[in-house]
Image (tube, rainbow, N blue to C red):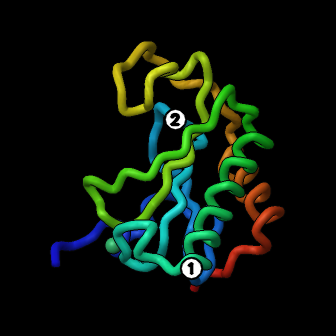
Amino acid sequence: MDACPLCDAPGGEVLWQNDFCRVVLADEPDYPGFLRVILNAHVKEMTDLPTTDQQTLLRVVLAGEAALREVMAPDKVNLASLGNVVPHLHWHVIPRFADDPHFPNPVWGERKRQAPHAASADLAGQLAAALSRRLGRARETG
Ligand SMILES: [Zn+2]
């Protein structure tokens, strides 16, 4: 099997994690607050998971959405699970603003503006705290 970037590395700055999945702040300079919820196991499709695990993963996705709404008050939140390039289950949880570079297009669509929406310098800390309030304390990493 080819190397998988989401098995080999966290995939961003880890804001919350447990033994099942992790929430990372993606390295997307155009999109401060762009979260990814990544299953720890290498699984391709949601329907490869048992129902309870599907629900657990979606609960974390929705906690990410709620954390973004609390901290950033976006105009819209986009949820997407593609995995065409990296077939390892992960959800994109993307805060969207009317002044962001692609709005109202998808972030993968045609660019409309140059500058990203302005964000707090302590965005990662604020999002990590908001996630922990909803999901409990993150498991400490070694
Ligand atoms: Zn993988």
Foreground of the two, 13 or 121: 13
Q: Position of residue 50 (x, y in %)?
A: 52, 80
Residue name at image x 45 percent, y 67 percent? 46
Q: Where is residue 23, by image quadrant?
A: bottom right
Can you tell which mark lies on residue 31? 2
Element under disc 2: loop
Circles 2 and 1 in contact, beta carbons < 8 Å: no
Label 1 sits on residue: 20
Q: Position of residue 97 (x, y in %)?
A: 61, 24
| Kind of residue sitting beneath label 2 | Tyr
Q: Residues within 10 Å of mark 1 (few under 14, many from 20)?
A: few
- Looking at the rendering, in which quadrant would you find the N terminus? bottom left
Rendered position, 113 above or below 19: above
- Per the model, the C-alpha gap separating discs 2 and 1 is 26 Å
Direction from residue 84 to residue 21 in the image, left or right: right
Residue name at image x 75 percent, y 40 percent? 69
Can you tell which mark lies on residue 42? none
